[in-house]
Image: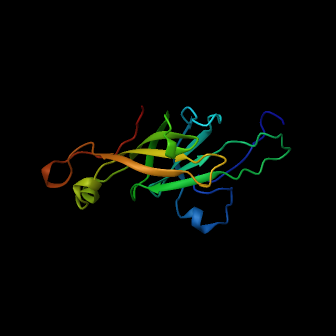
Amino acid sequence: TPPDTNVFKMHGAGKEYDTNNESRRKHGMLTSLAMSETGLPLMQESTRPIIAAGMESGTVFFHDIAMPKRPLKRVSLNTRSCGLELSKNPILTLDLVPSVPTESSGSGAVVAVAGMAGDAADLSELSIADRGTVAVIKTALPSVSGDKKEPIARLRARLATCRVGHEGGGKPGVATCRF
């Protein structure tokens, strides 16, 4: 394969690249991207590459992009994916790190930190628990040989960067998050 040739294309919100699929378009454009490998495997499987795609819609999608072990002339990537809606505002930044898997996480996990755009007036109308513009997410991948087919993403924490509403006035959006 020539060095400038794409190995595969995919939409940040979908399993395969498809510009005509309206359900994938509703998430808008890709606004942030991160990549990592899963933590150390329990069942002697190798670590697996994960891409996190932050979308304009406020949803983060996690894609297991492990490639087949056999050589292919043309790759038809069929990722195992899951998504988690964090807000109605774009996901501006993402970072991923490997996580030590547990018995329930199968062949590995990653922890993500996501920073979201935020408008102080809009956030002040939400409950205090939902005002945070930083989220910590853990995504577990099932074992390749297991019954579960898709990754599972869970919100672990939501953090606020400043007070909004009547008690203060900050700029709650987050443009950079790193572990």
Residue 22 appears anywhere in the view = yes
Task: Write the residue at 34% across / 46% down.
Answer: 157
Q: Position of residue 77 (x, y in %)?
A: 72, 50
Task: Write the residue at 16% across / 48% down.
Answer: 168
Q: Quadrant of the C terminus?
A: top left
Q: Position of residue 162 (x, y in %)?
A: 23, 43
Q: Quadrant of the N terminus?
A: top right
Q: What is the tally of numbered marks visible in this picture? A: 0
- Lateral position of residue 18 relative to residue 71, left or right: left
Residue 32 appears anywhere in the view = no
Residue, far left: 167
Query: Considering only vertical position in the picture, is 34 above or below 60?
Result: above
Residue, far bottom: 22
Q: Position of residue 41 (x, y in %)?
A: 58, 34
Query: Considering only vertical position in the picture, is 45 above or below 138?
Result: above
Q: Position of residue 108 (x, y in %)?
A: 55, 39
Task: Write the residue at 21% across / 51% down.
Answer: 164
- Lateral position of residue 41 relative to residue 3, left or right: left
Viewer-side residue, 81 vs 9: 81
Query: Considering only vertical position in the picture, is 46 above or below 10?
Result: above
Viewer-side residue, 39 vs 94: 39
Task: Write the residue at 78% across / 47% down.
Answer: 75
